[in-house]
Image: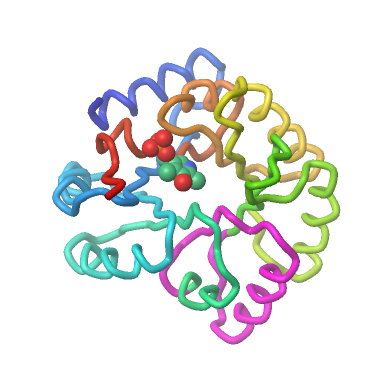
Amino acid sequence: MSLSEIKSRIKAEEDRAGRFPGTTRLIAVSKRQPDDRVRAVLEEGHRLFGENKVQEAAGKWPGFRDDFDGVELHLLGPLQTNKTKQAMELFDAIHSLDRPKLAKTLARLSGELGHCPDLFIQVNTGEEPQKAGVMPADADKFIAECRDLGLPIVGLMCIPPVDEEPSLHFALLAKIAERNGLDGLSMGMSGDYERAVALGATHVRVGSAIFGERDYG
Ligand SMILES: *Cc1c(COP(=O)(O)O)cnc(C)c1O
């Protein structure tokens, strides 16, 4: 599917849901995609991208940033504490804040670096043991802790279980955000971004629908 096709589907869904046009941001998820595909999307004028790994992003994005102005890069995958500083230097937003230790490290380094990326707290809405994110029942407390540390928390993020109706998870995430006064909702991927837009997503993270299948080699 082309980038413009996806953008027009997002717009149609915003219209249907009675949302202001343009209030959903499309993050093009470029992880494990060949450089020529990423470059083609940059040449179409798209500037907001997401990556899953600090190391992979550090290898490819400084070069793209030299060639294209105004790139905005978001980290979507788990962040190891020892890569926090590198991530803060590379990314404009981090969607995977999920534990107190990482929150404290971000707060300490914000002081040193004098800036901090926008932060989304990842919520494990499906309460899956293997998945990152705070449990829904712990979310309010963790959000408050992060705010006490002075961190710029802009919203919440979730990755629903593969075998469940994603709308239930999107609605739960929206509810937790609302009661905590958070505007940002990072939810929806290639298979379900339209449903996420209907439920108020401010950031959809779309990879394979834009770029094609990833190279898992
Ligand atoms: C890979 C990834 C995406 C994009 O997945 P697609 O199904 O290719 O759209 C979105 N969010 C996260 C956290 C991811 O790791």
- Residue 141 drawn above or below residue 179: below
Total marks shown come to 0
Ligand 1 image position (quadrant): top left
Q: Residue at x 69, y 68 (%)?
A: 103
Q: Is residue 206 visible?
A: no
Q: Residue furthest front?
A: 217
Residue 48 is a magenta residue: no
Q: Is residue 68 visible?
A: yes
- Residue 1 drawn above or below residue 112: above
Q: Residue furthest top?
A: 16
Q: Is residue 36 left or right of residue 26?
A: left
- Residue 192 drawn above or below residue 157: above
Q: Residue at x 25, y 38 (%)?
A: 211
Q: Quadrant of the N terminus?
A: top left
User: What is the x, y in percent for residue 2?
Assistant: 23, 28
Q: Residue at x 63, y 47 (%)?
A: 131
User: What is the x, y in percent for residue 78?
Assistant: 55, 58
* Rendering colour mode: rainbow
Image quarter of residue 208: top left
Image quarter of residue 157: top right
Residue in front for this viewpoint, 117 or 60: 60
Residue in front for this viewpoint, 63 or 24: 63
User: What is the x, y in percent for residue 123?
Assistant: 69, 45
Q: What stretch of residues is rendered in magenta?
A: 89-118
Q: Is residue 74 left or right of residue 5?
A: right
